Amino acid sequence: MHPADHVHVADLDACLDLINTVELDGPGGLPEDSLPKPDDAIAWLAGRSLAHEDVLRAQASRDAVAWLGRVHATRDALREVWEATVEGRSVDHRAVAILNEVLHHGTQPELRPTLSGIAVGHRHDARDPTAEALARLAEPLVTAIAAGDTRRFRICANDACRWVFEDTSRGGRRRWCDMTSCGNRAKVRRFRSRRRAGDDGAGRTPAEAADPA
């Protein structure tokens, strides 16, 4: 039995961490999945206290392929909703259906009597603990969208990366997931493009740079 007063919570960062478990610019330019096997996904969810490892493992053991596919499908749906929000476009209806199904399994609050009065606890979905864990990850994103608090949602400007993140910079103008990696690579590409075009980096061709006038 699990204690009744433990807490499972997830914030927006946890949601983004799940989305980013697929790195599009992996070795050789191929996507790299950090959750390729059920054991990896179980460890990821349980390690973040989103669900108990034993109940996840028991559920996954019934059909490991389908179980992992559900985790991956939810992750893909979260990315689709994030990207559609950032890009101001219509979202894929299949992603909406996947997330709505998961959200139906969200944690249910319940009142519990205590010696000094009453407390609020929660009740697990014993039939589908995986969906409950995934709902916890989706809820912060849904809450942000409902509040209209999406102006700092970002996708890395490196199209080979597309890491998703929330821009917490002071000016709110961050474009890259990491300036030292994707940002610098973009700078190098722009520099090489200018060199090929005969630009000296200041918007001038070699002939113009040599002309003091």
Image: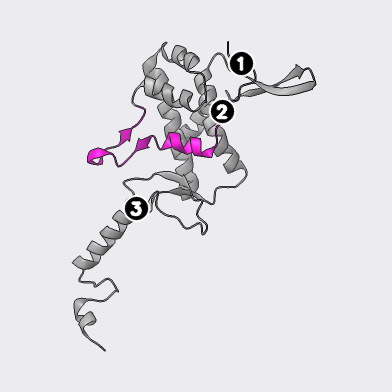
In the picture, the quarter occupied by the N terminus is top right
The CA span between labels 2 and 3 is: 37 Å
The CA span between labels 1 and 2 is: 24 Å
Neighbor class of circle 1 (other Cα within 10 Å; few <14, some 14-19, many 20+) is: few
The residue pinned by badge 1 equals 3
The residue pinned by badge 3 equals 180
Q: Is residue 58 left or right of residue 192?
A: right
Q: Is residue 202 left or right of residue 6?
A: left
Whichever of callouts 2 and 3 sits on the residue coming sooner in the sequence is 2
The CA span between labels 1 and 3 is: 44 Å
**Can residue 142 be found in the magenta stretch?**
no
Q: Position of residue 164 (x, y in %)?
A: 43, 44
Neighbor class of circle 2 (other Cα within 10 Å; few <14, some 14-19, many 20+) is: many
- At 19% from the left and 77% from the top, the residue drawn is 206
**Can residue 22 be found in the magenta stretch?**
yes
In the rendered view, would you say 74 is above or below 145?
A: above
* Secondary structure under the numbered disc 2 in the rendered image: helix
Question: What's drawn in magenta, residue-wise?
Answer: 8-35
- Foreground mark, 2 or 3, reads 3
- At 42% from the left and 54% from the top, the residue drawn is 175
